Image (spheres, rainbow, N blue to C red):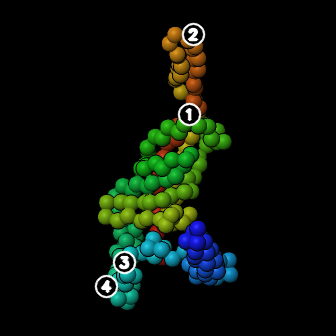
């Protein structure tokens, strides 16, 4: 009996010691608070595993290379010897790679009527045989101009969507007709000089 009392007394004192030291230990472990200002805890994933890399090319050399590329493209543009242009445009929720006189079938109606000319303003990329201009994310409206004409506004062939559960007398038939618009790309024009 006395041994039990001694063990219980020992248990009480050890648990009291744990509770006394638990709060400072918990506060020491929890370094993040609303006062500290850090939004992310510092873990192995919060910072990259590799050191910040600097470019091996000096800044002046990089500027010189950039100026040489821009002058070469400007010479091509002034001589008009770049060949057939292509462009990647974002239109109707999709990206389209287009060139002159291409036909595009869009799966919805647009506000323009048949015969109207429209301008595609979201141009992501323009390229030729020897150079490509890539936007981050878009090219400027003054740099490139892609125009199209609405050729036809129609509907797709009927698509039958049939659901059937065998041995349950369950059948559902749905006919889907999608509106469609056909566009013809009139031309892709680049500005005479790059800046």
Residue 188 location, x and y as percent? Answer: 46, 55
Q: Which residue is mark 2?
A: 169
Q: CA distance from mark 4 to mark 1?
A: 52 Å
Q: Secondary structure at mark 2?
A: loop
Q: CA distance from mark 2 to mark 3?
A: 63 Å
Query: Which numbered marker is on residue 72?
Result: none
Q: Secondary structure at mark 3?
A: loop
Q: On screen, 92 above or below 17?
A: above
Camera-side mark, 4 or 3: 3
Camera-side mark, 4 or 2: 2
Residue 190 location, x and y as percent? Answer: 47, 63
Q: Is residue 27 visible?
A: no
Question: Sequence-wise, which precedes: disc 4 or disc 2?
Answer: 4
Q: Which residue is mark 4?
A: 56
Camera-side mark, 4 or 1: 4
Residue at 56% across / 63% down in the picture?
141
Q: Which image quarter: residue 7?
A: bottom right
Q: Secondary structure at mark 4?
A: loop
Residue 151 location, x and y as percent? Answer: 54, 37
Q: Do labels 2 and 1 touch, CB within 8 Å?
A: no
Q: CA distance from mark 3 to mark 1?
A: 50 Å
Question: Sequence-wise, which precedes: disc 4 or disc 1?
Answer: 4
Question: Sequence-wise, which precedes: disc 2 or disc 3?
Answer: 3
């Amino acid at each position: 009996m006395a041994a039990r009392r001694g063990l219980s007394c020992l248990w009480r004192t050890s648990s009291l010691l744990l509770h006394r030291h638990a709060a400072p230990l918990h506060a020491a472990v929890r370094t993040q608070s609303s006062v500290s200002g850090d939004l992310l805890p510092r873990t192995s994933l919060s910072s990259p595993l590799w050191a910040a890399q600097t470019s091996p090319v000096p800044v002046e050399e990089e500027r010189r290379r950039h100026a040489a590329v821009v002058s070469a493209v400007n010479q091509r543009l002034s001589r008009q010897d770049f060949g057939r242009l292509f462009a990647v445009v974002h239109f109707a929720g999709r990206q389209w790679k287009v060139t002159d006189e291409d036909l595009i079938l869009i799966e919805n109606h647009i506000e323009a009527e048949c015969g109207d000319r429209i301008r595609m303003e979201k141009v992501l990329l323009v390229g030729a045989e020897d150079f490509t201009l890539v936007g981050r994310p878009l090219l400027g409206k003054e740099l490139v101009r892609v125009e199209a004409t609405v050729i036809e506004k129609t509907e797709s062939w009927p698509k039958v969507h049939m659901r059937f559960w065998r041995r349950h007398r369950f059948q559902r038939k749905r006919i889907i007709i999608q509106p469609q618009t056909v566009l013809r790309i009139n031309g892709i024009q680049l500005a005479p000089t790059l800046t």
